[in-house]
Amino acid sequence: MTYERTHIQLMRGYQPGAQPGHVAIKLNTNENPLPPSPRVLKCLADIPGKTLQRYPDPLATEFRASVARHHGLGAEQVIATNGGDELLRLALTTFVEPGRHIGIAVPSYGLYSVLAAIHQAPISGVALTDAWRLPADATDRWTSDGAQLVILTNPHAPSGTLEPIEAIERVAARFRGVVLIDEAYADFISPDIMHDTTKLINKYPNILILRTFSKGYSLAGLRLAYGTADIRLISPMIQKTKDSYNVDAIAQRLGAAALDDTEHASASWQYVRKQRMYMTSRLNQLGFDVLPSEANFILARVPRAAGWHDARDLHAKLEKREIYVRWFDEDRLRNRLRISIGTSAENRTLVSALEQLRGSGQVLQSS
């Protein structure tokens, strides 16, 4: 006998990356390879026990003010959430009628489809082009399906490719529903690109931008994120659909402390960019086809080689060496590995392992 609702019984839940022991090299969940700011750690140490006795500020007032100053927005244009996943769930709950579609790019972050299934919202999936870009008719196809929400990861996951501001603006201008831009990896975009979607918020009232502290600020264990948008999107989520005390007091304080030390975070972003260039170069030399990435990971097509059969086989062989990367059993991804950018030592260990596994045989051809 089962007590689940029928559609819950039939659906498949999200499958997170493996959580290996501390001795392993963990390059499978896109965490920042460097520790958080010392200012954040001092703030944590200085939090009095009484903070845990009381409920946190339900509106996260001081934290939202810090975010607003950081982006040059009003605090009323910011919502604090328990990780980026909560903002995704809030967007569906607030803006999508059950039974109406949500639009996504395919492939994409697996949780989008899971949340849609929970909400009983069909997926309107638009396949990315061969260059891993949105096709020109994407918005028309979402509109044709009657989608009320579009979710775009930018930089894209799992490829790391970046849609330019102009492409995002075209979607927002033509789509009649909410356009959620998931910018979980935006901190790692090259500053030369000058990519800033915040300026679109006051121009397009249907744009909702997701940002997280998990990646750029080395606080994945904290579960803290925020959304920025026109007040007409923020207000119903804050006043009606979010949990009563959705962000704990410690997270609110540490998030504000992190924003007060963006110099430390920026140094980690630059470190990741340099290591990303190193990994791309070395894997290309080994015969891998690595997509250009603006995130803290790369997506590499695995070549045929003497030391492994395919991407799944290589993934398993690396795990035996306590090196964890991500393999997806999905179309366009089955012969690719997504590799998070680790420390210099971790990255070099991975490259060395690939060289050893390949053995004396030469790369045969890309498959």
Image: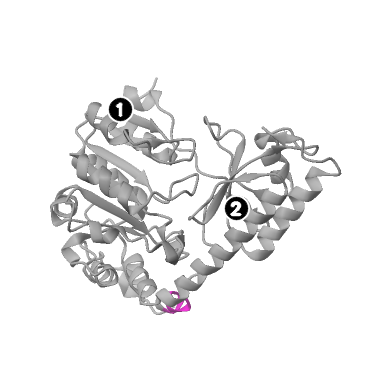
Where residue 291 appears, as percent x and y from the top left, is: 55, 46
For badge 2, the amino acid type reads: Leu
- Left or right, 257 with respect to 365, comes to left
For badge 1, the amino acid type reads: Pro
- Left or right, 345 with respect to 130, comes to right
Please say if 86 is above or below 13: below
Q: Nearer the viewer, residue 309 or 82?
A: 309
Check the picture and name the quadrant holding the N terminus. Answer: top left
Residues at discs 1 and 2 in contact (Cβ within 8 Å) = no
Q: Nearer the viewer, residue 131 or 251?
A: 131
Where residue 74 appears, as percent x and y from the top left, is: 18, 67
Q: Which residue is mark 2?
A: 27
Q: Nearer the viewer, residue 258 or 365?
A: 365
What secondary structure predominates along the stretch shown in magenta?
helix
Please say if 36 is above or below 188: below
Where residue 247 appears, as percent x and y from the top left, is: 30, 59
Q: Which mark is residue 122?
A: 1
Crowding at dot 2, Cα within 10 Å, few <14 / some 14-19 / many 20+, comes out as many
User: Is the image coloured rainbow, by chain, by secondary structure, or in one colour?
Assistant: one colour
- Left or right, 156 with respect to 166, comes to right
Spot the residue most to the top.
Answer: 1
| Residue 242 can be seen in this image | no
Range drawn in magenta: 37-42
Spatial CA distance of label 1 from label 2 is 32 Å
Name the residue at 73% across, 44% down: 320
Q: Which mark is residue 46?
A: none
| Residue 209 can be seen in this image | yes
Q: Nearer the viewer, residue 67 or 53?
A: 67
Residue 139 picture quarter: top left
Check the picture and name the quadrant holding the C terminus. Answer: top right
Residue 317 magenta-highlighted? no
Secondary structure beneath dot 2 equals: loop
